[in-house]
Amino acid sequence: MLTRTRLVLAALVGVAMLVGSAQGAALTDSLKKGTPDLQSAGPIAFCPEGILFIGDSKGGALFAIATGDTRQESASGELKVEGVKEKIAGLLGVTAADILINDLAVNPASGKAYLSVSRGKGPDALPVVVRADRSGKVEAVSLKDVPFAKASLVDTAKGTKQQDAITHLAFVKDRVYVAGLSNEQFDSRLRVVPFPFADVAKGTSVGIFHGAHGKFETASPIRTFAPYAIKNQDYLLAAYTCTPLVKLPVAELKPGEKVKGTTIAELGSGNRPYSMIVYQKDGKDYILMTNSKHGLIKIPTEGADTVEPITQRVSGKAGLKYQTIEPIKGALQLDRLDKDHALVLIQTTGGAVNLETIALP
């Protein structure tokens, strides 16, 4: 049997509650006031005391920014914003077609939702961060004259691959795990960055067997991942395009090393995962994932330690099974809102984009 979920709730919710003000102050004290030279706003995540991490693929850097947003909202009522993309566009003085929402993260210190946004298109797009609360209010987050720190990453992808230089990140314990592509031949990379930031070491190269493609691959980046413990050992459960689900032992993520992940599921070809969390319900652990083909899916983690690894070409689905959550369609990004709920960014059939609170299925 698998151990119960150890890391996700502790990293994103429990840490904010248990670390205490002393450590939180120490984390904030590591930041210096100024204006970060942010070139793009991609994947985002939180650590205690309302500190927001922003992945900057264009600049090849990771930023930590103190939002000052540390007062917990009332837990009553759902967080729901209809037409959130249109509201952001109005806030920025552009049309909805001129913005792209890149990621969603819930601040455990306040319960507010944060969205990383590109204003404009192409190389001239500007990075923006906005937040929303339970009242439906949407506001821009200042990125000027704020306490921040910057970690420049080593060997991030350039040129046509630059948009995938940082594809996902998460804060666990005292480290930021950063997935993306490098500019080397062994492309796929996982970086482990200590926080407060110190010198950033070269990342770990990650290869996997892709069942749908029938071959070992090193060029495809991890699209999303979630920390999880199996038999008291820390892992990252990672999802790739088209759609292998892989477990990676954290202990092997050492600078400059090459690691081969274990493929524990194929979720079907022609599919792109967007985001995932791990949660517990009725004494069992599950993965909740948004993706382009199946909407919102629920994957039991039971068997992740014993399932036969996928090492040969498969047609369709294999390994761990999943359940499609109906009637939710058009799910894009999600994050855990509280113990019993998730916050999901949903694109409607009419093209509008909403923020919706759902009960964990």
Image: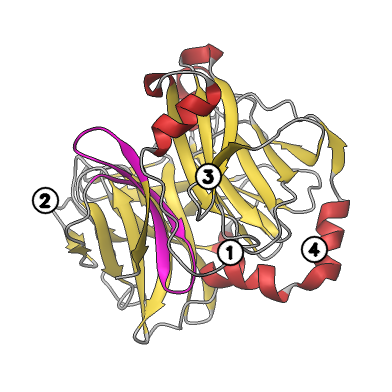
Q: Amino acid at mark 2?
A: Ser
Q: Earlier in the sequence, mark 2 or mark 1?
A: 1
User: Residue 352 magenta-drawn?
Assistant: yes
Give the residue at mark 4: 24
Q: Which residue is mark 1?
A: 12
Q: Badge 3 is on which residue?
A: 137
Looking at the picture, which amino acid does disc 3 mark?
Lys
Separation of marks 2 and 3 at Cα, in angstroms:
46 Å
Q: Mark 2 sits on what residue?
A: 315
User: Quick check: can you spot residue 223?
Assistant: yes
Toward the viewer: 237 or 327?
Answer: 327
358 left or right of 233 in image: left
Along the polypeptide, which appears first: circle 4 or circle 1? 1
203 relative position to 281: left or right: right
Asked if the residues shown at circle 4 and circle 1 are in contact, with their CB atoms under 8 angstroms apart, the answer is no
Q: Amino acid at mark 1?
A: Leu
Q: Which stretch is magenta?
A: 330-354
Crowding at dot 2, Cα within 10 Å, few <14 / some 14-19 / many 20+, comes out as: few
Real-space Cα separation, disc 4 to disc 1, in angstroms: 14 Å
Q: Which SS class for mark 1?
A: helix
Q: Is residue 27 magenta?
A: no
Q: Is residue 336 above or below residue 301?
A: above
Distance (Cα) linking label 3 and label 1: 23 Å
User: Which mark is first along the chain, 2 or 4?
Assistant: 4
Task: Report how far apart the C-alphas of labels 4 and 3 lie in the structure.
Answer: 27 Å
Toward the left, the furthest residue is 315
